[in-house]
Every structure is written in C-alpha cells, then in structure tokens.
Image (cartoon, helix red, strand yellow):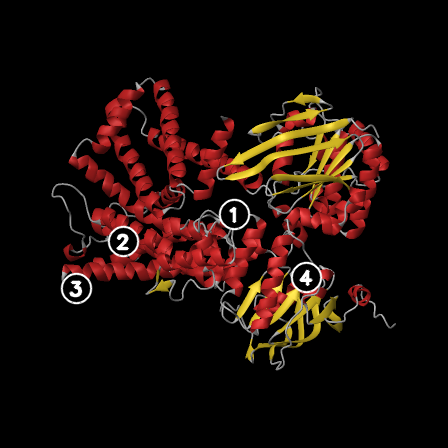
Amino acid sequence: MDENNFALQMQDITVEFPGVLANDHVNIDCKKGEVLGLLGENGAGKTTLMNVLYGLYPPTEGRILLDGKEVHIGSPLEAIQQGIGMVHQHFKLVDTLSVIENVILGIPTKKQRLDLEPAKKRLLQLCEEYELFVDPDEIVWRLPVGKQQWVEILKALYRDCKVLVLDEPTAVLTPAESDQLCRAIRRITADGRSVIFISHKLREVIQITDRITVIRDGKYIGTLATKDATQIKLAQMMVGRPVTIERKSRPVIEDLKPVLVMKNVNAKDDRGIQALKNLNLTVHAGEIVGVAGVDGNGQRELAECIAGLRKPTSGTITINDKRVTGVIADPTFVGFIPEDRQKTGLVMDFSIADNLIMKDYQNAPYAQNNVLQYTAIKKHARDMIRKYHVKTPSEDVRVRNLSGGNQQKVVIAREIDPEPVLDIASHPTRGLDLGAVANVHDTLLKERNRGAAVLFISAELQEVMALSDRIIVLFGGEIMGELNGEDADQEVIGQLMLGHHPEN
Amino acid sequence: MELLKKNKRFEFAIFENLSLTTGRTLFGIFLGLLASGLLIALSGVNPFVAYGALFRGAFGSMQAVSNVLVRASPLLLGGIGVAIGIKAGVWNTGIEGYMYLGAIGAAVIGVLDLGLHPGLHILLCIVCAIVLSGCWGAIPGFLKAYKGVNEVTATIMLNYIAIYLTNWVVSNFPLVAEVGAFYPMSKQFQATARLPILIPGSSLHPGPFIGIILCLILHFVLNFTPFGYRTKMLGSNPFAARYAGVDSRKQILMIITIGAVIGGISGAIEVMGLKRRVFMEFVTGVGYESVAVALLAGGNPLGVILSALFFAALKAGGATMSIETGVASSMNSIIIGMCMLFVIGFGVIDNRKLKKIVSTDKDPENDIAAEKEGEK
C-alpha cells in the first residue's frame, strides 16, 4: 500500500452549533483501499463529521482534500460527483419504488423514455461482483432491512464512489448479514476504493478496519493501526476512562419475597400469532431476572403483558398479589422502560418537563384542583435533569432535540425515580454508548439493592450475564431454561437461545 | 452566513418559537392577498381601491365592526370545536351538523311561551341545544373511538342527516314549524329566549364574546390542565398516551362530543341572537368554514380568535367591496382560498425543512434510525 496515497483527508474540521461544538478541529485521513474505522460514543460528532463530508453542512473551519487536492463540497450532489458515497444510518430510499428505480434515482439522463434494462444489467453485475444480491425489480419496502442496506451500498457503487461512508451499518443487521457486509467491504477496498466505517461497537471495528480514528466530545483523540488496538484500549480512548463489562458484585439479599408472579400465561402478538406459551415466571424483591434470547422470541409481549399493555389470552399475572388487568400507570408500583422509547416511552414533541410527568400528571404536586402546577413540574424536571445527568440547556427543550442517550435518561428518571416495586427494563441500553450503558447498569443494580424486583430484558448476552441474579432464556415464547446468574455459562445460554437443550 | 441562517432555524426548532408560526401565517396571508389582488386587477378593478373598500366594509364604522363580530361568532365557536379535535388528533368536521342540532334544541324550548324569566329561558334553550348536539356528536365519537370508523366520513354523513332533519322539523314538526310560511322556518323565538342586542341599532349579540371567552378557556384547558395534557399527548403520540394509562377511546369520545357541544352552542346562538328563527339550511357552510378557521390557526385556540376574525372581516368587507367596486362577490371566497393555500403551503414547506433539521442537524449522533430499525 502506498503510504502517502490518501484518498481523503479532512483537516481541522470544526463545526459549531449554537452552544455546541459538534466538531473541534477533527482530523481524519483515509488511504486508498483502506477501511478506516471512525469510532466514538453517541454524540461524539461522528455523524456530523460525515455530514460535512457529504456537503450537508459547511464546516466553520477546516478543509477537505480528495486525492491530495483541496475541494469544496457544498451539497450532496457535489459530494457524489466528487466520488463520495454515503450510507446513512437512516436509509434514504424511496420505499414505494423498486430497487433499480432507487439506484438510478437522481442520475441525470437525456432520454425521454426510461429504459431500465441497461441499468439493471449493470446493477446485477455489481451484485455479482460484491456478492450483495438483491432483485432489481423488488419494491424496496418489501425488502428486509438488511437487504435495504445492500441497496444503499449498491447505489453508491453504481455511482462509482471512491470513498464509501457507512454510518453504523451493522446496527440493523443480523450476525450473518454482518459477516456478508464484511466480505463485501473487503471486495470494495480490493478495487482501491476506501471505506469509512462508523460505529461504536468495538468488536466489529477491530474485525473490519485497517486503522481506527477515535473522536470524543467532538475532539480528535487519536488514530491507531487496528493490529495494535485492543478492545480495552479503544474503549478507554472513547470514554476517557477504563470500562468493564465484568459481572457486578452485589450484596446478598436474604428474604426473597415474590413480587411478580406469572402463571400459565399465553399471549398473542400483533399479528395474532401465539407469542407466549404457558409461561411461568416469578421475580422476587431484590433480584434481577435477566431475560436472554434472540429478539422476537416473545420478549416484547412478555414486557407488555406485565405492564398491562397487552392482554394475555389466558393465565394470570400478579404483582404484589394484585392481579394485572389493565395498563399500570402508577409510577410507584411498576416502572417500565419500554424497548422503543421514541414510539412508546416519550412524546417527542413535549418538553422534558412534560415528559417527566407522563404517568403523574394528574397527581399532586403536579396537578392541584385540576390545574397543572408548572412551578412544581419544572422544579421536578430540573431535579431529575441534575440527578440523572441529562445533557440539556433547559427543562423546556423538546425531547425530540435530545440525543438518544439523553432521551433514555428522561425515561429512566421517570420510571425508576419513584422507586417502584417492580422494574421492567426492556432493552434499556439499546443504541446507547458505553458510558450511558454503564449508567443504566448501575441504576438497575441500585434498584435491585434497594429491594425492587427487576426484570431485565436484553438481546446482549454479555450484559444479561453481568447483571442478572437469575437468567431465563426465551425461545419461541417459551422458557427454554433457567440458570443461576453467578455461574451461567455463555455456551449453554447460547444453545438455549437457539432452542437446543444442551444436554440433548 | 448560511450557517448563521441555519443556526437561527435550529434555535427556533428547539424552542418551538410561536413567532415562527405566526410570522409564517401572516406572510402566507400577505401572499394570498397579493395573488388575489392580481386577480382583481385582471377583472379590471384597481386592487387598491377594492381592498380599500374591503377594509372600510370591515372596519369603517361601528356598524361595520359589529357586523364583523356577528359574522365571527359561529366561526369562533366552530373553529375552537374543530381545534381541540386537531390537538387530540381527530378531524371533527361535523360542526355544520352540530349547529343544526343546537338550533333545533334551542328552538324546541325557545318558541314556547313558558312565562319564564329571560335569563332562565335562554339558559334552558342552551341546555337543550347542548344535550341534543352532544348526543349527536357522541355518535361519530363512539364510532371513531370504539369501532374505528373514520371520523371525517362519519361526521360529514351525519351533517347531511342533520340538514334534512332540520328541514323536516321546520316544515312539518307541529311544535316548532311555522305553518304556511313562504319558506320553511320555525316559529319566532319568544322575546324571553332571544339574546340581548349589545349596541342598539346593530345586530351585535353576545355570541362573539362568548366565542372569544371559550377560546381563552380552552387555551387554558389545553395547556394547564390534566385533561389538556391528556388530549395533547393523545394527539402527538397515541402509543405513549396508552402507555401512560390514558383511556384513549374515552378521550376521543369526549373530545368529539365537546366539539359537538360547542358547535351546538354556536348554532343556538345564531338562531337566538341573530336569526330569531330556525330557517331551512340556515348554516350554509359555516361549519365547514370553521374547519378552515381551525386549520389556519394550526389548532391553536388563541389563533382561532385571530383567524375567525380574519375570516369574518373578509366576508363582511367583501360584501362592501363587491357592492362598491363591482368585483364579483365570489372574490371573497377566492381571497380566503388563496390565503389558506399560501398559509398551508408555507406550513408544508416549513415542516419539511424543520424535519430535515431534526433528522440531520439537530441530533447529529442520535441513532434514531438504528433504533427504529432494530426494534421493528
């Protein structure tokens, strides 16, 4: 590899938003045929940097060089013309058009009649070449999310990009698809193209990239060759302090009083398919029960049934001997961190203060004589913002304008702070960065030690093992097995998650 | 420079600055007037002269102003009825029908000589109007909330039934109908059941002020009560509302019914304050105009006051304009239509820009997409 042959250099890029320095003199460079990892926590400024590259906003300072020549990129169109391809986290596809129509969309043509055949041919060639197979005639919304990503990548390749930016590409992929993506990336760089791979997942970055640049709080921290990098080292660079996903030590709680008792619960999912089958589960006060399993094996229905959002078709659920019959909106009884915080857990257009009283808005001190007491509501919000370290200029900011991690802090503050007898945490760390994840873990452990019963649902095996006193494994709506958290074996859980009983 | 401009927007988006919406609305109205001015010029009349006449017709005298207020009365009440629906995420397009039902309710009591004190008689009429229109509104409310029937379809269909029901009442219902009249109408309201005229010699009744007061009350209710909180939560995120324990069905039923009750009051006030009788088809589309009023106000109760007055001024002044300058009287509707078009057009463009800022500028690192996809 030619050492001085940079496909892309971004030097001293500074981007300023009101009150926020999103990028502060960030430098990256990417050689031809190289995979550069861009690593940083959520909110570190990775996407901002890439949006500068893609001409979505002009940097306050700094310059961009392509092939050693300084360029000005004023719009995505110019970026595409300069050979930059971008796959956003949030796909920019037209759902109702076919794959091929999406691929050629925006490419100018002089012809009056649209002839898709040559384009299709070329696309199929690309599919073949990079082993990213999609049917050109399929309508995009019918494709699974992973395939949609192939379309995005093929779109960029079709435009013959020199530098391909992949923003958190694996967030939506299954493990098999991730592997496929890895192979495709290898082929792409083999042609002398460069790939910038944005992620906050250390393992992947180490697996895929050649070099890694780390940014933190908008600042450039450093670049190192992947072969010299370790997960621990990178994590330290990212968060600025050592992190562990070690099992957390905990005091032993003697008197285990059952709080949540589920007996023979059956439930259907939204499509009417049996999602929980004869489920029996007890969660005691002062214990974290971790629910492991591949996503979509009844976890959502389990959480919703307990919270009263879904009616079981049969069976009984009691919490502290009280039968669950409808939605439980008493924050001192059940705290529920829902898996989709933006769709269920928050009203995005409400202020932080309003979101924090979502389950309490008709109770004193927030409402008196049927009038909302905004002095009390705002004071409560300021207290919560301080206590849970929500990063925001004020409690009046709409939740929509917070980062994912800070949104989650709002949900957690609302659900956990009233000290409920039962906490249901459904994928509470999904999409959060390492620092925020550690925070959530600490909060849940504190809840357990306080004497709350905690049901912790997660698809990340490591955190289930680190946090749980007991682990149950869900498969196809059934409990495949129950393990002691202290000495659970990852292999065994893995087998159970796939529906195999290890002893068989 | 460009960045500066973007930053401004950024702040606007964060603090939900009202001035942005208001400014946008005013600019849309300005463009609407400009475009209509061109049309007026095309029809051979100097637009400045025409608009001068319009302005004089609306604000030129005490008489004119009271005329504007009288015309604003049903729009204020109807507009606020629709607006609370918008806040809850439902399109309550049944104001027309509720007005008829309210008018019938008022007439049933109002034409009878009960020998009551005027205050009491008026109150009874209003109560009857509220009961009838409330029951009427509960029908689409129930259908929407519990059966999932589209509220727009249900209310508009019911509007027709209400119109024909009124026709029957004023021509054939012996208790109410004036027998042998030249046009189907009810008997005249008893003097004790008429609303007082506030300025002698004009037709100014208390209706517009009741409307303004109701707008203020609902502004308060929406922003400072648990009921309003629930309503807005339901309107902006029904999933979250359910999660927070809101009985969304009950809330939708209530909101549609409240809109109906206000519409009913509006109809009752029209017949008790202005018309003195219930005529066949006396509402003539005011109920639908209320939807436009609420739209122009963006569902904001305080905005409804301004937008209802604006509509009324255009309608009142438009009549003068047409008489004085010979511009076709349909020009009123064209002006209103133009203004609506520009205001809504700006709304769409602006929303799109805001959305773009939200998804790119605002939370640059927020992996909304990743989460959304991941959770599917």
Image disc number at residue A400: 1
Q: Position of residue A34 (x, y in %)?
A: 79, 34
Q: Is residue A126 left or right of residue B304?
A: right
Amino acid on which the number 3 mark rests in the picture: Leu
The disc numbered 4 marks a residue on which chain? A
Q: Nearer the viewer, mark 4 or mark 2?
A: 4
Residue holding disc 3: B114
Amino acid at the residue labelled 4: Ser
2 or 1: mark nearer the eye: 1
Residue nearer the viewer, A68 or B343: A68
Q: Check residue A458 in the rendering and tell me which mark sits there, or answer none.
A: 4
Residue at 55% in and 57% down: A345
Residues at marks 1 and 3, CA–CA distance in whole angstroms: 59 Å
What chain does mark 2 sit on?
A: B
CA distance separating discs 4 and 1: 24 Å
The residue carrying mark 2 is: B268
Mark 1: few/some/many CA within 10 Å (<14, 14-19, 20+): many
Q: Residues within 10 Å of mark 4 (few under 14, many from 20)?
A: many
How many marks can you see? Answer: 4
- Label 2 environment density (alpha carbons within 10 Å; few <14, some 14–19, many ≥20): many
Q: Chain of mark 1?
A: A
N-term-proximal mark, 2 vs 3: 3
Q: Residue A355, image x and y in percent?
A: 47, 56
B278 to B343, vertically: above or below: below
SS at badge 2? helix
Three-letter amino acid code at the position of disc 2 = Ala
Mark 2–mark 3 Cα distance, whole angstroms, equals: 18 Å
The answer to whether the residues at label 3 and label 4 have Cβ atoms under 8 Å apart is no
Does residue A107 appear in the picture of this structure? Answer: no
SS for tag 1?
helix
